[in-house]
Amino acid sequence: MPTIIEGPPGRETPKPLLARRLIWFVGLAVASALATVVVAYGLKALLPPL
Amino acid sequence: MDALILARLQFAFTIAFHIIFPAFTIGLASYLAVLEGLWLTTRREAFQRLYLFWLKVFALSFGMGVVSGVVMSYELGANWSVFSRAAAPVIGPLLGFEVLTAFFLEASFLGIMLFGWKKVGPGLHFTATVLVAIGTFISAFWILSANSWMQHPTGHAVLPDGSLIAVDWWKVVFSPTFPSRLAHMLLGAYLTTALVVGGASAWRLMTAPTQPESRIALRMAIGMLAVVAPLQLVAGHISGEVVRHHQPLKLAAIEAYWETRADQPLSLFGLPDRKAGKTQFEVAIPGAGALAQGVSRETVLQGLDAWPRSDWPVVWLVYWGFRIMVGLGLAMIGLGLWGAFLVWRGGPERSRLYLWAATLMAPAGFVAVIAGWVVAEAGRQPWVIYGVLRTRDAVSPVGAGQVSASLLAFLIVYAIVFSAGALYILRLLHRGPEEAEQAPKPEDRAPGSALAAPSEAGETPP
């Protein structure tokens, strides 16, 4: 766990373009949501059909 | 034991386990947002290290909360199918809204909180943290809305086949007991988090009294306790007034009012005896019941004798659940005010007695939350939807053997999985942020930062 949590950028680190940061923001959010969807539908698939 | 009792025991076990995690993560998400906001505005490294440390604890607690919550949705179908079939048109959308508007918000932006700080930059990362905190609030909103509707159902109609439909969603979502219960639960969650943060910090300060992160965290926890614990007393009182209006039978069980009369006593302690219809070995203040309820002494308050015994909840459980919750709440007020006094006098870390008290009180929020939910849920019995569907009529047509087997499986799996998770969290709390491996690497530290020269950040111990 400690090795995968990302800390903040250093003060000397050059700031990426806003567009690039926004793409990461949306991309990570969508990827996290998709991962949740996969788990949720996987669990639903375990239910017997009505 | 029959299937009904076993199904109730199973739900009580799984939900009592589950509530521990949201009660903690609701407050912790807000705490993380405050820490990151403080880091953004002050750039003190201590706030950043505290953030990264508590983020780990949050991620683990969030995960265990999700897993323990999924179990309950299966349980509703397996053990409570009659309830599910009858109430799904009303309860289903509320739980669905919780998943769509809250859970997905939390799950999506937790990814950025954990893996995206360098990628999205400080501003957008802070936005993600705030969105997760808002998500936990929205989650509590929908769950409390659903539960409050079960406590006092409004805005629905009963169809000839016994199933329920919503005819006024506004009344379903905002049932009369909902606002006060939501406020009471949210404040309880903030107190739970403050107690854990304060307790963990106090524990570390006993061995490292000058440790800056723990000193800051303890002061923040004390500030929260000193303000929120007295507010919770007010919120609890308002919640009690709502119960008196809408669930007088529950109030009679909470206060052990056996007979309907004016000038009720205020029962402090005792052993409620359902068979005898009185409280054995009772310590009570005569006439003070009206004072506690905020009514005149001439006001007649309904006692348990106003309802048939078959409709009574388990009186001792409700009576003692309430007293445990209130007792711990008063202890929290004391801890907060005592801590505020010590901060004013120079520092709580100088008082070993206070550090021990804060450490011992760390789990008190969890106990109080569970005790409060016992009052709410056991006090609603024998109804699963108050006045509409009895608990005994809501259970699935399953045998005691089947429910026993699943209960045993839950006990074993929970003991293994959650013990491992809880032990890992306790180990993290014991180590503290100062030993966190996530501390910024030297190349990330700005020249002259707090890590490079602690005295610059004003964190040098006196």
Image (cartoon, grey):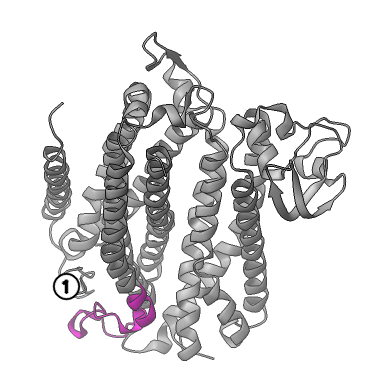
Local crowd size for mark 1, using a 10 Å CA cut-off: few (<14), some (14–19), many (≥20): few
Which of these two is toward me, B281 or A40? B281
For the residue labelled by badge 1, is the local secondary structure a helix, a strand or a loop? Answer: loop
Which of these two is toward me, B232 or B393? B393
Which of these two is toward me, B79 or B49? B79
Q: Residue at 20% of width from left, 56% of height from top?
A: B111
Q: Is residue B301 left or right of residue B82?
A: right
The answer to whether residue B280 is magenta is no
Q: Quadrant of residue B394?
A: top left
As drawn, B295 above or below B86: below
Q: Residue at 47% of width from left, 73% of height from top?
A: B217
Q: Which residues are magenta?
A: B426-450
Q: Residue at 32% of width from left, 50% of height from top?
A: B407
As drawn, B330 above or below B301: below
Q: Quadrant of residue B450?
A: bottom left
Q: Is residue B394 left or right of residue B293?
A: left
As drawn, B12 above or below B423: above
